[in-house]
Amino acid sequence: MIKLVIDCMGGDNSPSVNIEGTLKALEELKDLHVILCGKEDQIAPLLEKYKYDKERVEILDAQDEITCHDSPVEAIATKKESSLVKSLMLLKKDDSVNGLVSIGSTGAIISGGIMKIGRIKGIKRPAFCPILPTMNGGIVGICDSGANVDCSPLFLHQFALMGSLYMERAYGISKPRVALLNIGLEEEKGDILRKETYPLLKEDTSINFVGNMESRDFLSGNYDLVVCDGFAGNVLIKSTEGACLEMLKLLKKTFYSSLKNKLGALILKKDIYKIKDQMDYNNYGGAVLLGVKKTIVKGHGNCKMKSIYHCVKLAYTIEKNNLLAAIEEAINKNELVEE
């Protein structure tokens, strides 16, 4: 049995989307047990609307919540009755609880993951690894996407190893193609960080390193994992998402600009919705926080039920495929523990 705790009070549409998405996953995954953490007086009435296996659902009452306006470190230290802190403490103290899913404050989740759960032996810095769709119908991961603004070559080397194992264990990608985000494809390109990281990845035979990648090729489908510091990764992922959204707006504006275009849009309606669906982040779950001792999946703050469903399935799959044990073994086997 895989047991997950769900932080039901995080995000813009909580707790309804958290509950609905979790119950959808529960219906599909017969060996899943969930603990819904949050305000019981809000969660219990919502649960009454659904049919579900009551033997596999618990409620952990938490009358406080951490918002995006709170200082992450201070909130984790002081808001002990918040749904996120109580979820983290349960995850830490109860060995039967495998993972946590939350769409709450990113900073608080990072702080809580490090302060309450702790790092896997040998890991210097945990890192976020979200997934985006590629133009050929596949997916690409990016590690790190914002947890670590300042990085060393060792950090990036560990990100590459953790992310590679993640893409393999969670998504079934054999020998994921790993690229280093840079300003050019040539080996000598980039700043000191990139120049010092490149040979580390090139010499590590446990990583399928394919060289540098320029940001314009991020969604090309030629790479399975992109490695970078959190600052560059966050800029890349947000600019990519923003560009895609603006392009969809431009297409919509064009289709409604004339009768001829409206007729054309009507003919292409199914294809247009297929593209929109392909680019919808709700179909790809959340970002896993790689490097901590328990599975933690962070979803988008304003996500829909479908995204919660995928977040829960992702956490479940990670546990089923023993990702954390594989990371600890690989990090220490490769002796990536000292700078």
Image (tube, grey):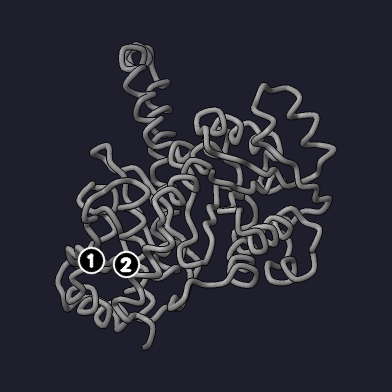
Indicate the quadrant containing the N terminus: top left, top right, bottom left or bottom right.
top right
- Residue 161 found in image quarter: bottom left
| Residue at x-position 24% and y-position 63% | 179
Label 1 sits on a secondary structure element that is loop
Give me the disc on residue 160. 2
Q: Residues within 10 Å of mark 2 (few under 14, many from 20)?
A: many
Give me the disc on residue 219. none
* Number of on-image labels: 2
| Residue at x-position 64% and y-position 52% | 104
How far across and how far down the image is residue 304, in percent?
Answer: 57, 35
User: At label 2, which amino acid type do we have?
Assistant: Ala
Q: Is residue 7 left or right of residue 237?
A: right
Disc 1 vs disc 2: Cβ atoms closer than 8 Å?
Answer: yes
| Residue at x-position 37% and y-position 46% | 132
How far across and how far down the image is residue 112, in percent?
Answer: 64, 66
The residue identified by callout 1 is: 207
Label 2 sits on a secondary structure element that is helix
| Sequence order check, earlier mark of 1 and 2 | 2
Indicate the quadrant containing the C terminus: top left, top right, bottom left or bottom right.
bottom left
- Relative to 255, residue 17 above or below: below
Q: Is residue 27 left or right of residue 15?
A: left
How far across and how far down the image is residue 47, in percent?
Answer: 73, 29
